[in-house]
Amino acid sequence: MTIDVGRPVEMMVPKREQNPDISPLVEEPQFIRKSKFEVYGEEMIEKEVKQSGNSGRVYLPPEWVGKHVKIIRIE
């Protein structure tokens, strides 16, 4: 698999529903900026980040130990 990490390409996407924890007096932008990444690599795994104390954790295959990886948040 070939994925190219070039410069990010920004695009505008519609904003998700409003967060009820945010005061209605605070005006949120109508659009959220997203970036497109092209990455060169050997394998790709898509996983959900799990809670781990005050942080998040993603388990990867043991064969990946010692290898360089790139993490991209998609939502």
Image (cartoon, rainbow, N blue to C red):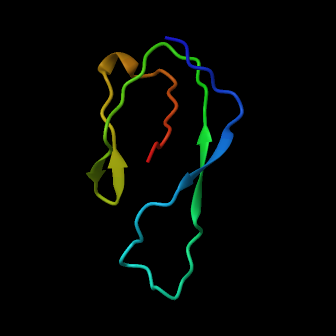
> What residue lies at 55% left-to-right and 13% top-to-bottom?
2
Please identify the quarter of the rendering in which residue 55 is found.
bottom left
Q: Position of residue 34 (x, y in %)?
A: 59, 47
> What residue lies at 46% left-to-right and 42% top-to-bottom?
74
Counting the numbered discs, the total is 0
- Whether 61 is drawn above or below 18: the answer is above
Depth check, front residue: 29 or 3: 29
> What residue lies at 39% left-to-right and 72% top-to-bottom?
19
Left or right relative to 63: residue 70: right
Q: Where is residue 29 in the image (x, y as percent from the top left)?
A: 59, 69
Depth check, front residue: 32 or 6: 32
Q: Where is residue 47 in the image (x, y as percent from the top left)?
A: 32, 35
- Whether 34 is drawn above or below 22: the answer is above
Name of the residue lying farthest toward the right: 7
Q: Where is residue 52 in the image (x, y as percent from the top left)?
A: 28, 52
- Whether 40 is drawn above or below 29: the answer is above
Name of the residue lying farthest toward the bottom: 25
> What residue lies at 35% left-to-right and 15% top-to-bottom?
63
Please identify the quarter of the rendering in which residue 48 is found.
top left
